[in-house]
Amino acid sequence: MQGFPGGTPDAQQLQATMLAIEQACSLIQVHMNPSEAEKVLSSLHSSLMPYQACRFILETSLMPNARFQAAGAIGDAAIREWGILADENKRSLILYCLNYVMEHAGSPDGYVQSKVSAVAARLLKRGWLEFPDQEKGAIFFEVEQSIRGMHGPNRQFAGINFLETLVSEFSPSTASSMGLPKEFHEQCQWSLEVKFLKDFYFWAQAAVFNTADQILNSNVTLPEEKACSAALRLMLQILSWSFKPTLLHENSDAKINSGLRSDAINLKKFERSLVKPGSSWTDILISSAHTTWILNFYTTLRQKYSYDTLWGDSPIAVSCRQLIVQLCSLAGAVFPNDNGDAQVEHFMHILSAVILWIEPPNVIAESIRSGGSESEFIDGCHALLSVASLTSSSLFDNLLKSIRQYGTINLLSALTSEAVKSVLDNHNEEETWGSDALDILLETWNVILGGNKSCLIVTGNLLRSIEVLGLSYLEADADKSPMSADGALAASSLFKIIVESHLKAAADSAFEDSDDAEYFHVSVSKRDEQLALYALIARAAADTTIPFLEQLFSERFARLSQRDIEKDPTRTLEELYWLLLITSHVLTDSGEGETLLIPEALQAGFPNVVEVGQHPVVTLSWSIINFSRQCLDPGIRGRYFSPRLMEAVIWFLARWVATYLVPLDVSREIDNMGKHGSQHSRKLLNSFAWDNNQGELVLDFVVLISMVALTTYQGEIELQTLTCQKLLASVVRRKHTCAYVVQLDSWRDLTRAFASGCSLFSLSGRLQRSLAETLACAASCIKDPEASVQYLRDLMGPVAGCLLENASRSDLKSVAHQPDVIYMVCCLLERLRGAARATQPRTQKVLFEMGHTAMKSLLTLLEVYKNQSEVVYMILKFVVDFIDGQAVFLDGKETSVLMSFCLRLLQIYSSHNIGKVMLSLSSTLRCESQSEKYKDLRALLRLLTNICSKDLVGFLSDSNIEGSPDIAEVIYVGLDIVTPLISLDLLKYPKLSRDYFILMSHLLEVYPEKVAHLNRDAFGRIIGSLEFGLRNQDGDVVERCLTAVNALASYHFKERLGGRGGISSQLMESEGSNDKLHESISSHFLRLLLQLLLFEDFRMELAGSAADALLPLLLCEQELYQRLVHELLGKQHNPTVKSRLAVAFHNLTSSNNLSSTLDRPNRQKFRKNLRAFLGEVSGFMQIK
């Protein structure tokens, strides 16, 4: 082929290369000597100008794998050498690959053709911005002819497959890496969309039209069917394109009034997105009745193969259905400006065809259970979800009424019922269709019920802000269209079926001992997500579903009360367990760390209720709370309240307290908002929990049940975790409940048990810490500052005192290593750590006092437990958290005390070589769990990082306290301990590596002058680790290292500018051309960064950080930079490369009026220069 690159081929050399590649492929296939085989294949991919050899292999070899490798090598080499290929070479490679694909279209080795096609697409994209549109059009003309069937079905399929690959290559999410900036890919994407994408769709559409008659009239599988399936896939792929936004019609308000949504609902969970190609696509998608034709085509095919229950899984059926589902997501200006009529008609046409896939639900479900295909049913559910995402609930419901006597919501209800039954009947089996369908259908309910808006959260002055905007409490969520009476009835019926089905499943699982019984486990996130969606359905008909739940719960509660002692209550308890879970979701919303409002559907759902005792939400709430109170009776607790049931009780109480113990000012604000029919019901719900001191009684019960859970159910980690981290935390986190609870006798009993008792020492260390943090946080809610301080002293004083007592024992060394003593010390340290994490402005002083009291004891314990890594780790972690909490509050004196303590701590640690790791042992680490031996090392890194934090810097400089240690002194004592232990092997472990480089970047930013005066060994270790980090695979680590180099080089430049030495005295040993040489640090990093940028796989997203590090290096080492550039240009034998490289280096340091400063504007200019430089040289500088 004219213009094919690579020079005149040597026949013998070509033959030898082919044999070597074939032999390597054979070895890999039989798993013999794979490393050597990989080297052979890699040499082909990385060799200079391998095109003639690859062409010879493609045209001559009988081994498909060898041809596959040759195709890949052409692509890799062309991308790498793009900058030195002539325009004629580039076009020749693309045309050769396309011709090869067409000529071998009938080959059985389809994966080879797909690879060659992918190479053609990749190269075409690489030259997309270089080639004129006329040349692209000439290439696509031949492809179009093949797609239209001019050269037979095989070439038709090959042409369609090429366009599939091309569209994938131009799509950002599936584009291959080319080492080019993001802007290049965006320009290519925009150009293809505007100039060619619609043509591609039209050609694929023509291919489907041209093959349809043959497929419909034939009784055998034809090659045309394969081409038709591929064309349908291409159409789907194009409609999945991320189109650039276009202007909406001016009458978008009219569309909203017609029931169409203007907001985009995110369905990425199901890989669905809105299709908005714009008005230029109206003719091909809307005016041409394209959708109707596709629907009729599929329906006709479906009727033709109605005898074949598995036809629904055939490629053509799947492709056609998925295209139909994607057409459901059409939106925006593609529809004419007709008040939304065309879009509504579009949905009705699709729904009239899709209904055949999913109706009647019970018959289709039975067919699937009997072995039929479920794919059509699943796709039908997807279609409903897509339509629901673009319509209001009323329009969605009405779409089906034109062809059926019931609405779409009734159909959705019936479908969901079948899916729920399938899941519960088969949850132990491998069948997943019911679960897949249920996920889609529940998300559809979520969309039509506005689930993404139903959880209104009060943050700050949200209610007041709504008033300022002139909105009522109801109007804040007014864009949700109300559900019709029929829809509410359907939701009510569905919810009752859901509850009854799950209650039966729960009862049936009562005596199961297998792991499958964990299907009902409270903490499973999938389960919570499903229950939350069930709750939305319940709230849509709250006036019937809430009384239904109350009736069911009361019946089960009464059944327990009336049960004879001889009868086994297990089935009833399982039902109560599930009812507690679903009721907690129906009555409350989740919202970690936020103040929740009562769900809007419940506030607005009972406008006719006037008596608090008659409100279903109130009666259901008190029914469950009264049931929960029974656990305080030891006898009843022993018979009925298993740990699992207690988990559900605690879970319910945590959510209920956070929702219904509403601040009284919220109730008053609701009173002040406009008058509505449901206003009285709202007031009832927002105030009933506090009526007649009920709120205080509930809080008292919460504390009592917490004590029971923490002391009676020993070893039940899940239950105790829920108690500490959910229930008690929810009470303390909210100031209005915390202010009440701290006044309760039960709370004082809990704090006394914690401070002085022994019962809570059975909790795990993590829970000791969590409980201490919760109890200490409550101090901030005590209004009297003196009482708050006294509360903390009473709470934590005994803990610090106990630690001091243990550390002061005369026989400490003899008893210290007894298990019970170690356990006690660890518990006390965890409690101190928890309190340290609760530091707040009002409590900082007393908590610092607590920490100060414990400092001497901690140093003593560190001496004694030098060989107990667990205790050492606990001490270090306490100090880390203590400094983290105190840093922003400390004055000069307190900082001095803390730094003196840290210095002594590090000195003791160092003197005993605690954590000393033999470098020979570090290489034996094989997994993350083994590296936990080094967690004290990680704790030290975090300790030094906290000390180095800018929150501490500056305090000591303002306080001339004699003898106070410099913060830098403390840090460098720590570094002297840490850096010898950090081997390059250890830095391969992500957690340790990340902590280390966070410290290094922070350290060099804050104290660069200190680094300059480190001894040679310590300095060399830091520089060596930075060099290692720059080649790390973790982008965050590389960015941290670039930040560190930037800080060091900037300091050096500024020092030299001021006539000082900077880091000139520090030299680095490097490999020279003849022998080892010594060079400055700035010279060393300049060489290293240029090597990374020019010759290694550098990530373009790090170009900004690289520019920041490179600029001060260039300013410091201008002579070296010029010499390196001159040497590099001298090595280039290709005149074109040499010329382009010289221009690129010149522009790097002279474009955009770059100056010799490090101010922000100049750094921004250099960032632009470096990005342009990398884009220019990436096509030819990585040639080996």
Image: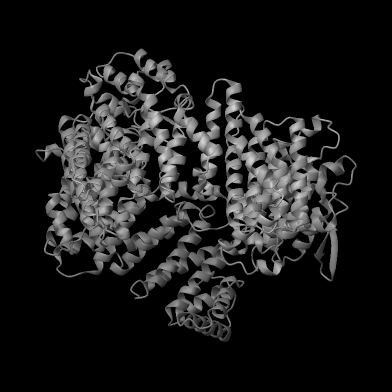
Residue at 65 percent of width and 30 percent of height: 846
Quadrant of the image for the C terminus? bottom right
Q: Nearer the viewer, residue 804 or 685?
A: 804
Left or right of residue 1089, residue 335 in this image: left
Asked if residue 592 shows in the view, the reply is no
- Number of labels in the image equals 0
The image quadrant of residue 620 is top left
Residue at 52 percent of width and 46 percent of height: 761
Left or right of residue 302, residue 884 in this image: right
Residue 1048: percent from the left, percent from the top?
A: 77, 47
Residue extending farthest to the right is 1059
Residue at 46 percent of width and 49 percent of height: 189
Residue 737: percent from the left, percent from the top?
A: 44, 26
Residue 1021: percent from the left, percent from the top?
A: 77, 58
Residue extending farthest to the front is 810
Residue 150: percent from the left, percent from the top?
A: 30, 64
Q: Nearer the viewer, residue 156 or 220?
A: 220
Q: Nearer the viewer, residue 916 or 1125?
A: 916
